[in-house]
């Protein structure tokens, strides 16, 4: 008979409450000492938001709205699964492909993404909780 049973179970069972998404993001970036998974999720989400904000003119408005809704709704609950929610945003990949038309930008993106791939592969191979 409880219409909000899911919300109540999240609060009582796991301690998940609704919060300010920007406060959650900033706290995850700068106040998550010793919790690499939370810090990585916060910085990756912040990078995605910054990328969308800077290059908003290159993305159709419907895709931009989709990205912001897809980021801010889960961010209200915390940073626990933000890597999964961020990595499926297809307009970001379209934007990176558009930016990669320039050879210099393509080289920089390739180097950065290869280094990140190597780091994440090391985390995964040693069993770190950063990668699920």
Image: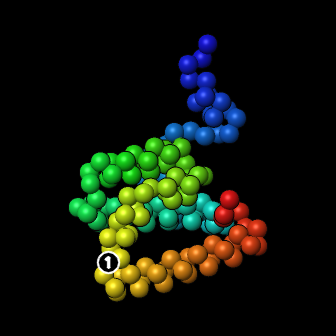
Q: Residue at x 35, y 82 (%)?
A: 105
| Place of residue 129 in the rendered image (x, y in percent of width and height, measured from the top left) | 71, 63
Relative vertical location of residue 98 with respect to residue 20 in this rendering, above or below = below
Most foreground residue, 106 or 79: 106
Q: In this view, does 103 lie above or below 119?
A: below
Element under disc 1: loop
Assign the C terminus to one quadrant of the image.
Answer: bottom right
**Mark 1, other Cα within 10 Å: few <14 / some 14–19 / many ≥20:** few
Q: Quadrant of residue 37?
A: bottom right
**Extreme-top residue of the structure:** 1
Q: How was this image coloured? A: rainbow
Q: Position of residue 120 (x, y in %)?
A: 63, 72
Most foreground residue, 33 or 120 = 120
The picture places residue 29, in percent across and down from the top left corner, at: 51, 64
Q: Residue at x 56, y 76 (%)?
A: 116
Q: Can residue 57 be seen in this view?
A: yes
In the rendered image, the quadrant that contains the N terminus is top right
- Residue 96, image quadrant: bottom left
Taking 129 as reference, is 118 left or right?
left
* Residue pictured at 66% horizontal, 64% vertical: 130
Across and down, in percent, residue 7 comes to 58, 30
Q: Left or right: 64 with respect to 12? A: left
Above or below 119: residue 81 = above
Q: Can residue 35 be seen in this view?
A: no
Q: Residue at x 70, y 69 (%)?
A: 124
What residue would you read off at disc 1? 101
């Amino acid at each position: 008979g409880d219409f909000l049973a899911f919300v109540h179970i999240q609060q009582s069972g796991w301690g998940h409450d609704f919060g300010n998404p920007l406060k959650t993001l900033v706290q995850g970036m700068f106040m998550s000492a010793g919790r690499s998974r939370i810090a990585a999720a916060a910085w990756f989400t912040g990078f995605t938001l910054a990328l969308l904000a800077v290059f908003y003119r290159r993305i159709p408005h419907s895709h931009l709205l989709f990205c912001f809704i897809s980021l801010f709704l889960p961010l209200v609950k915390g940073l626990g699964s933000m890597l999964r929610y961020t990595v499926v945003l297809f307009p970001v990949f379209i934007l990176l492909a558009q930016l990669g038309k320039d050879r210099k930008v393509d080289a920089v993106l390739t180097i950065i993404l290869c280094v990140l791939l190597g780091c994440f592969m090391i985390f995964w191979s040693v069993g770190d909780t950063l990668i699920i």
